[in-house]
Amino acid sequence: MATHYEVLGVSRRATPEEIRAAYHERARRHHPDRVGAGAHPGDVMSSVNEAYRVLCDPGRRAVYDRSLAGPTVTTADPDPASDDWTDEWDAPAPPRHTPLSPAGPARFPWKLMLVVAAFGSAVVLVAAAFTDPPSEEPPDGILRNGSCVEIEANGDVREIACTGSDDIVVDLVIPTDARCPADTMGYRDRLGLGTVCIRA
């Protein structure tokens, strides 16, 4: 049985351009419209088409070349000038794609995240154990129940740092349209956020 190379009339080392030119020449010569009702012209043309289909694709050609070589390995040095000599290294190998990661969805590094979380928790706990908490928060200007205040000349109050002696302490903060309880005096928050009730 003739090989695809023999059907097209090219050597096994033929370039893609030589294979294409040989196919066009054979197709013109053996086309059924040109040959007419001869001895099975369709069989010859189908062989030419199949040979070209295999040899024009580098991957199919490589597989076909390996099938021609067979499983035997020769130890003698072959003659490179011979048409029937096939160098397995000359045949274009099919493309091999090596994936950068295994197939399937990406995996989340749970173990690494657990180690990082444990280390971070340990750092926070050690830092908390050796750090003294702030003795008192500095005033932020927003009046709350228990804030220390100073009464200004215009009757407004503003927050100050508590000193512990003779501090004026906010008993209750209410909306501006509400009234302070009977045992407290009402003052306007300097920021206008409400009325401050201070025990008399």
Image (spheres, rainbow, N blue to C red):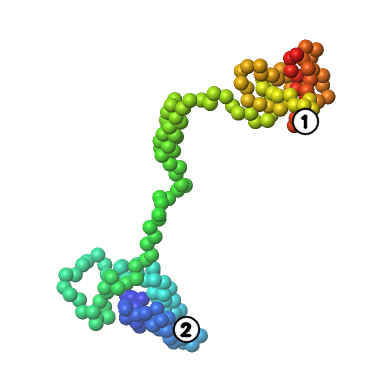
Q: Where does residue 167 sit, x and y in percent of width and height?
A: 66, 18
Sequence order check, earlier mark of 1 and 2 = 2
Q: Is residue 19 above or below residue 58?
A: below
What distance separates the C-alpha of mark 1 from that of mark 2? 100 Å
Which residue is the site of mark 1? 192
Left or right: residue 37 compared with residue 154:
left
* Amino acid tagged 1: Gly
- CB-based contact (under 8 Å), mark 1 and mark 2: no
**Residue 47 located left or right of residue 166:** left
Q: Nearer the viewer, residue 36 or 154?
A: 154
Q: Is residue 89 visible?
A: yes
Please tell me which residue is depicted at 23% across the width and 79% down the height of the picture: 80
x and y percentages locating residue 182 in the rendered image: 80, 12
Residue 51, horizontal then vertical, whole percent = 40, 75
Nearer the observer, 126 or 95? 126
Local secondary structure at mark 1:
loop
User: Can you tell which quarter of the image residue 164 is in?
Assistant: top right
Q: Position of residue 45 (x, y in %)?
A: 44, 79
Picture disc at residue 11: none
Q: Amino acid at mark 2?
A: His
Relative depth, front residue between 38 and 156: 156
The N terminus sits in image quarter: bottom left
Foreground disc of the pair 1, 2: 1
Residue drawn at 66 percent across, 26 percent down: 160
State the SS at label 2.
loop
